[in-house]
Amino acid sequence: MKYEASTPEEYINQLPEDRKPVIEKIRTVIKKNLPEGFEEGINYNMLGYYVPHSIYPDGYHCDPKLPLPFMNLASQKNSVNLYHSGIYANPEIHDWFVNEYPKHSNRKLDMGKSCIRFKKMDDIPYDLIAELCTKISVENWINTYETNVKKK
């Protein structure tokens, strides 16, 4: 589902009532655990967490006017999706997450290259999301991005 919003609050206000508390809780977990330097805003019509131009002036190689994306959170038709670029770009983070997930949820992991889909709102592993947020600093993300993503 696509929401037109210019602030995280506008995004959340448009969500179905049953999704608002879930998105708000994940948002709180992310903001509490992301390392210093990442900023929150709207990115790709979702809640976005990114490296601002003040830290990384080059921006995103596909569109340098955009800040360097890192994580996104979205309410889709059938799921709440968490997009984490570190899972896509760093095999160690990917493997760690895949191995940890069964310790935090009884459900099968539903994951794409960088997208983790949560279809059951009552079984979201908030503690695992919190730990995932702490795994990559802004500096580490810039280095990973320049080494593994930008050069492709």
Image (cartoon, rainbow, N blue to C red):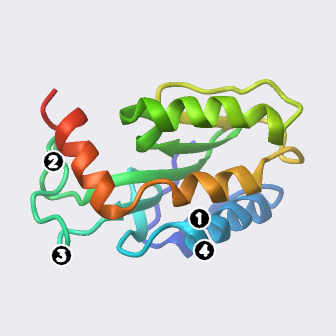
Answer with the quarter of the image where residue 21 lies. Answer: bottom right
Q: CA distance from mark 2 to mark 1?
A: 25 Å
Q: Which residue is mark 4?
A: 32
Q: Which residue is mark 3?
A: 54
- Residue 83 at least partly seen: yes
Helix or strand or loop: what does disc 1 sit on?
helix
Q: Quick check: marks 4 and 1 in contact, CB under 8 Å?
A: yes
Helix or strand or loop: what does disc 3 sit on?
loop
Q: CA distance from mark 4 to mark 1?
A: 5 Å
Kindly identify which numbered label has been placed on residue 30.
1
Q: CA distance from mark 4 to mark 2?
A: 28 Å
Closest to the camera, between mark 4 and mark 2, is 4
In this rendering, position of residue 90 left or right of residue 97: left
The image shows residue 7, relative to residue 94, as above or below, that is: below
Q: Residue at 14% across / 44% down in the picture?
A: 61
Q: Position of residue 59 (x, y in %)?
A: 16, 57
